[in-house]
Image (cartoon, rainbow, N blue to C red):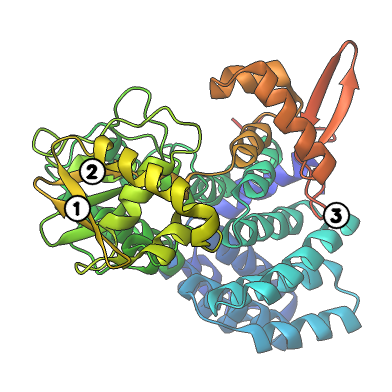
Amino acid sequence: MSWVEQKAACERARAVTPEAVFAFRAAPMETRSGAALAATEGLRRAWLAFDLDGVRHFRLALRAVSNDELLLAASDLWVAAAEGRDAGQLAEKVETRASSEGLASLVVETAALGALSAATRGDLEAATRIARRASRMARTEAIPQVEYLAHLVLARVRRLTGAPHLATRILASLRKVAPPPWWPSLAWEAALCGAAPEHGALADWLLALERGDGAAFDARTAKLRAACTWPSHRTDIEPWIAAIDLRSPPTPWSSGSTAVAPAAIDGVLSWRGVAPAGDTAVAYVLADGPIRRRIPRLAFALIDRARIPPLAQSRLKQGRTEMLVAALALAPPAGIDEALCFASVYGFPYEPEVHKSIFDVLVHRAREHLENRGTIARGGGILKLVLDAPLLIADPRCSRPLGDALLGVLAENAGASAKDVAKATGMSLRVVQSTLQSLVKDGACQQERGGREVRYLVEDTTFSEPTQRARIDWG
């Protein structure tokens, strides 16, 4: 299908309604076949517009005009994806039959929906395997609409498996070529990777927090939840709300059981929010009476920063001082064993004969860093943070590796030079060049020479740019 034909198909699909399809129930078989095709396109359009009622109604309309078991089963997959249900077994059956009948488009479509099903049930290993296969088949077949679907699903799976830079790379590429009906889905996934939402309740919610406006947080959160009529969207936003809302039950990350943030909140950690100048942390620890939890920067909007000003970050390279204080702030009230605390800060086991003097110096620096907020009690092999005032401190243990930040820039700016990346991140050119070379060596990105300048690209081993032949302006 050419680009002009795609645009014409989009215009026709907008005119189709379930009621119009129902009108052909008593028509001759040939006419009903055309109505069934229209219903199928309408169902897909409703799915892309996050119109759950529309998806269900078009499925009913399709059943009224068609008795094609394969077509009906495929429509059931779209409904399951819309309702957030696992339909993995059905997807396998439909794909097998579509393959036996040589229906390449339906094979790719079904594989992509099967990957969504696997992600829905939490089997990310299977979701990755199926999404990669669907994307490769889509690239081979070069059928635009199913190609967009397969790549969109791959982007979602990449994000869910902790590779937002790869997801961003895919989404940025699709945004250049996919027609308008795809834009809402692309924009939603991009926002979950840390891009600014274009509009809507999610944008209102995020931008208010970024400005430090927490006064109407509950109202905006209720509005956001109400706007998320798509089940998967509700699944997407709840981890964000839980990470920011100080009243929500603790998670392993917010309680400090792990410093590795789940992929579900990678996007919210990317937002700057209200923070002091020079503060580069993505996560903080708040200790205020019974509240002891790790939070993203956006949660600053819900904190009285006049009463609880964040401690200034030390300028020591690795931030061990803040790491120690943060670890103690998240420790049980009775304190924490020195060896466990050391391992939490340094990432390797404590050997007293080797590490005691180093750790003694760190504890001393941490006491000084606390200023008048409190002190660190030490005795009997136990460390305990004793606070005289509420505490808000950066937790460098959650900081993203520098390479991840650079990959994020490259994902949005394919072919950027080291100078471009340094300008975008505010880092020194020498550090950026050194890190990029390490990423190239590790295979995380590629470099190519354009004239006198070296440019860098993030490449997904599965994804390939959709064709842009005869490209038109969808705007």
Q: Report if the CB atoms under discs 1 and 2 are less than 8 Å apart.
A: yes
Other-residue count near label 3 (Cα within 10 Å), few / some / many at <14 / 14–19 / ≥20: many
Q: Residue at x 26, y 55 (%)?
A: 329
**What residue would you read off at disc 2?**
392
Cα gap from disc 2 to disc 3, whole angstroms = 49 Å
Other-residue count near label 1 (Cα within 10 Å), few / some / many at <14 / 14–19 / ≥20: many
**What residue would you read off at disc 3?**
139
Please state which amino acid type lies under the numbered disc 1: Ala
Establish if 67 lies above or below 13: below
SS type, badge 2: strand
Between discs 1 and 2, the one toward the N terminus = 1
SS type, badge 1: strand
Q: Report if the CB atoms under discs 3 and 1 are less than 8 Å apart.
A: no
Residue 332 location (% of width, % of height): 25, 68
Establish if 420 lies above or below 187: above
Horizontal relation, residue 25 to residue 465: left or right: left
The total number of labels drawn is 3
